[in-house]
Image (cartoon, rainbow, N blue to C red):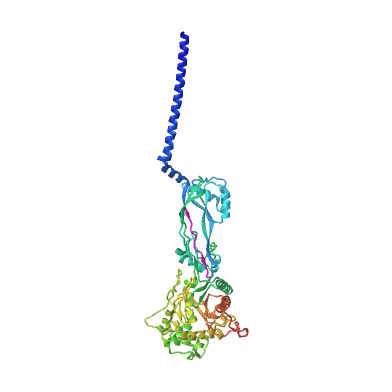
Amino acid sequence: MSRQESAKTLGQKLAAGLKAWRFGTVLGAFLIVVLALGWRLVDLHVVDDDFLRKQGDVRTIRVEAIDAHRGVITDRYGEPLAVSTPVQTLWANPSQADPDEPRLANLARLLEISEARLRKRLADYSGREFIYLRRKVQPGLAARAMELGIPGVHTRQEYRRYYPAGEVTAHVVGFTNIDEHGQEGIELAYNDWLSGVSGRKRVLKDNRGRVIKDLTLIRDAAPGHNLELSIDLRLQYLAYRELKAVVGAHSARGGTLVMLDVDTGEVLAMANQGSYNPNDRSQLEPGNLRNKAITDLFEPGSTLKPISVAAALESGEYSTDTTIDTSPGYRRFGRFTIRDFRNYGVLSLTDILVKSSNVGVSKIATELGGDVIRNLYARLGFGQPTGIGFPGEAVGVLPAPMKWRPSEEATLAYGYGVSVNALQLAQAYMVIANGGIRYPLSLMKLEAAPVGERVLSEEVTADVRGMLGQVVARGSGKRAQPGFYSAGGKTGTVHLVGARGYEDSQYKAVFAGMAPIDNPRIVTVVAVDAPQSGEYYGGEVAAPVFSRVMSDALRLLNVRPELEVGATPKTSEQTGERG
């Protein structure tokens, strides 16, 4: 073989070996890569699977709260008084949001907030992941905000409390704060019952924090329990309308009206002036928050005279035919003098109430003793909680001295020296109206008749009701006559107490009564504070409110009219008696 051919053969062998080596190298490298990838797959899907899943979940899966629906408050017929409706809350993640984002100007205008303050908050809280932009807005507004597509801006569903009757039921129902925690009224007293228990769920979110889908339910939200109040919304509107009208007509400082069911002790209406709108608290005055029917105390004045007469009848020492000489129309106790409107002379027990004689009822108290009258007041509930469970209830003052002074016995008999709230006064008249049974009062609708306590006999209460009927028929309560229904009640006019004692020119006009008088269905107390129109007596200011409210209320309750057209007393007639 020639040298040239040998060199060629060697070159071919070298080329073939180099080619085989390259192939082996590439194949080996490929196998190494495959093995590396395989191992990596095994490592990712087997060895580090749990760790990686957890890391992924941290970045995309969140646990969110599910707001619980607060219980609904209704009147006795199911009319809503407080409801929670779904709304949207706008919030931002400052770590994702750019304070210099141009679209923030549009968002600020849409939400009616300061653009400068919005940008400053995003910059100041850049290390945080959550700040509120605006809470509890209408879903349509939230949708328009999200259409702006601003990074870091999100929404979440919450609930907002609405009060369909507004200021009409504000003092009874109360209101919640923005987090739906009760702050006043029934909302506060029954907050735990009404509040639900929030739930929790896992959700999948994208890198902008938007929920893609719900994954699992950890715990479902438990809604709050509903409440059915004893309030009749029809009567509540009626009471509120008439009370507001009389306060406006007499330029009064305020007023209160309470209406009770005689046979159950349920509160059918409870209204106050001034009031407030729980749906719009921008003009809220703290003084208007009080439910004055329960929290405010006053001396009931002549409205307690029927109870003093009941104590006299119960003692057995007096009867309906007993007469008392009230001449000369006044009584002196040292420097203190009790006066009647005029000298009425000899009066029967009935006429003592009809004429509202301070002298007559004070003579009864002197003979009976202060303890006898005071003990009956206590049995009727004065100086004690009504058991209604309303926040801020005032129990009043019922004196119990070791030894009564004659002037204290006298003034106690006609409602001075003792303080009550309007609800306590209504409870006392309820006992007279239903034949002597004191029922626990209730703001909740009762499914069964309550168990009451007898505190007066049927005979005594029947006699007192007859006397109260005469007060309306021919006495100081003539203007309380409710249209075609009979009624009974008592007027009261008391001095208001100021910083220096009794105010000479400021009065509270009160009327407490029941209807129909032969078989009472409702008891109502009306109190008007400091009327400024020139009229201030209970028979002039409060009694006409009782007349209008009771007339309409009895018709609404389908109580059959008793009186013929010709038998209806003229409510404009004045008698000269003052109570």
Give the camera-side residue of 223 and 183.
Answer: 223
Dividing the picture into quadrants, the one containing residue 163 is: bottom right
- Residue farthest right in this picture: 566
Q: Which residues are magenta?
A: 64-76
Give the camera-side residue of 224 and 280.
Answer: 224
Q: Is residue 501 magenta?
A: no
Number of labels in the image equals 0
Position of residue 26 measured from the top left corner of the image (x, y, whole percent): 46, 26
Give the camera-side residue of 3 and 578.
Answer: 3
Majority secondary structure in the magenta region: loop
Q: Is residue 73 magenta?
A: yes
- Residue farthest front in this picture: 1
Position of residue 367 measured from the top left corner of the image (x, y, whole percent): 42, 88
Visible residue check, residue 111: no
Visible residue check, residue 570: yes
Q: Is residue 107 left or right of residue 60?
A: right
Position of residue 141 measured from the top left corner of the image (x, y, whole percent): 57, 54
- Residue farthest top in this picture: 2
